[in-house]
Amino acid sequence: MKFSLVADTLGYMEGTTKRLELTQHLVDLFKITPAEIIPKVVYLLQGKLRPDHEGVEVGVAEKIAVRALSKSTGVPVSKIEHEYKKAGDLGQATAIILEQKTQTTFLKEDITVERVYDTLFKIAELRGNRSQNMKMKYISSLLNDASPIEGRFIAKIITANLRLGIADYTILDALSIAYTGSKENRPSLEHAYNVCSDLGRVSEAVAKKGMEALKHFQVSVFSPIRPMLAERIKSPEEAREKMGSEFAAEYKLDGERVQIHIQKEKTVLYSRSLENITSYYPDIVEKIGKSIKARDAILEAEAVAINEDTGEFLPFQELMHRRRKYNIAKAVQEYPITVNFFDIMFLDGKSCLDMSYSDRRRSLENVVTEDAFAKVMPMTLVKTDDEVEDFLENAINSGCEGLMLKQLDSSYRAGARASNWLKLKREYRNELGDSLDLVVVGAFYGRGRRTGRYGALLLSVYDKESDTYPSVCKVGTGFTDESLDQFYQILSDKIIVKKDSRTDSGLEADVWFEPEVVIEVVASEITLSPIHKVALGKIRKGSGLALRFPKFTGKIRFEKTPENATSSSEVMAMYNGQKKVVQNEKQF
Ligand code: AMP
């Protein structure tokens, strides 16, 4: 197939923004495209070579493209650069230069879609020292035979500047019209797209076998599924209205959604936006095989940073330390995670998408063998608002953002934001208005960069009634290297061999101190806690109050004695203040 057909279509499309016209141009092109080539055409139209999740990028520097054009036309680099500056666009400049050259040469070979695609693919695969020269050679051989309009789009595609923004859904519309005769069939195409996230694969199937191919469109390992999304609700009552009499409530952890594809020894991980994120989680790749009893599977999990000493979940930001190219092994050590499975979409050669939530959950529980690293997301069946509230409270106390509520008989609706999944977060209009002054009663040894110092401090309030120091949080954020050194020094002469009789905490610190040093902390909210002892039993039997996401502000309150620290009753007042905000919100 001549590449000029694709280039002409791109040219027409550049001239319009109307969706109907754009679609029509695509339909006309698809109708004359042989089925074997359709995936290549579809990718090129979007300036790609493969679906995004495969990470194949042409990415040629503009300098190289300019030199290649100079090589194939004999026009000096400086003249091309001048033309580029004038036109403001390398594609346009390429077309002008080729136009001038066309007037002086006659012999040209037609270039085909296959040749353009295959050459670009070779360029994308080139690595290493000599790759620049090779890239230039490939490009200049293409440009040698390209017409001005072909050259213009080749230049745009190789430099990743094809900014036509042809949306996936416009392409699906056009495929539906061209190959099934009607736009009405688009939902079937969309379904196929949602289960493989690969427009090339969908286009080839429908071009070869029409609607029939879509009926049998299969989920397959290493083709990421577009994730199912949840609607947001404000109260448990809303959940009951939408979900009926009984539904599942799962913890909503605050980490990164990971779609895990496993086949034999191979594991590939995709993010929520279907980027391949395997390299950020070598620990998942290494350990997860042991926990999954399956020949092949696609599972969904939330990867969450944890404090390995206490098992506490840490906020999402902690995971971002993993987003680096180098020294991943160090990040894995310093920021350990757990993997919390919440869904299964494929198992031993079969799709699970059409199974009900209950069946998928059962399957998930069978497939995952839990250990310290791999967990199945905590879940309970709920019927009443109180049951939802209770589980929400548990979830928040365990460091979750809230709950995910899921309809028991609902299938996995790939790519859809549907009301079969609801998210219920506990949110306050304000974070805790005030900072708190807390007493350092214990410390935990640091690891990684903090080895040889304290990594986190155990903090208490002062309880006037009983003259004790009940703990209210463990704080590990907000410290600079200097403040860590400073604490190590200041606290060294407060060390005592065993816990002070007035200190009250469910946590076992590595080192205990006399309650003397007071520091300032901010936090996002106050929650019920089974570990911390402030106002124990006053709000709920067996629970105390704790700070969520506490952070050291950098201030050591040397001027304060421990008795001047924030008191239990102040923390209780803050907690009750929060409750009011939540209740007020519900009324509106
Ligand atoms: P949001 O990002 O607020 O729209 O919430 C949806 C996100 O919550 C998902 O993309 C997951 O990353 C995350 N999540 C945490 N726990 C669960 C769960 N139990 N089920 C589904 N998603 C969850």
Image (cartoon, rainbow, N blue to C red):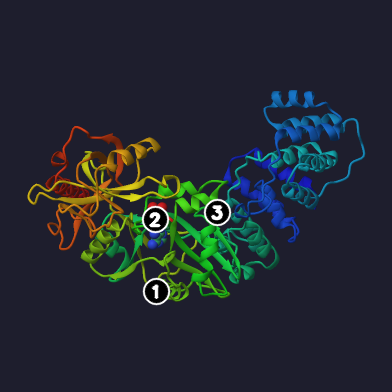
The quadrant of the picture showing ligand 1 is bottom left
N-terminal label among 2 and 1: 2
Disc 2 and disc 1: Cα gap in Å? Answer: 28 Å
Few, some or many residues within 10 Å of mark 1 (<14, 14–19, 20+): some
Q: Is residue 548 visible?
A: no
**Residue 447 x %, y %:** 42, 50
Between disc 3 and disc 2, the foreground one is 2
Q: Amino acid at mark 2?
A: Ile
Mark on residue 231?
none
Q: Residue at the left extreme?
A: 465
Viewer-closest of 33 and 248:
248
Q: Amino acid at mark 3?
A: Ile
* Residue at mark 3: C-beta within 8 A of ligand 1: no
Q: Which residue is mark 2?
A: 306
Q: Using the image, determine if residue 237 lies above or below residue 520.
A: below
**Residue 38 x %, y %:** 71, 57
Do the residues bearing badges 3 and 1 touch, measured as CB atoms within 8 Å? no
Disc 3 and disc 1: Cα gap in Å? Answer: 29 Å
Q: Which residue is mark 1?
A: 358
Q: Which residue is mark 3?
A: 277
Q: Using the image, determine if residue 310 lies above or below residue 110.
A: below
Q: Helix, strand, or loop for circle 1? A: helix
N-terminal label among 3 and 2: 3
**Residue 240 x %, y %:** 27, 65
Q: Helix, strand, or loop for circle 3? A: loop
Q: Amino acid at mark 1?
A: Ser
Between disc 3 and disc 1, the foreground one is 3
Q: Helix, strand, or loop for circle 2? A: loop
Total numbered labels placed on residues in the image: 3
Few, some or many residues within 10 Å of mark 2 (<14, 14–19, 20+): many
Do the residues bearing badges 2 and 1 touch, measured as CB atoms within 8 Å? no
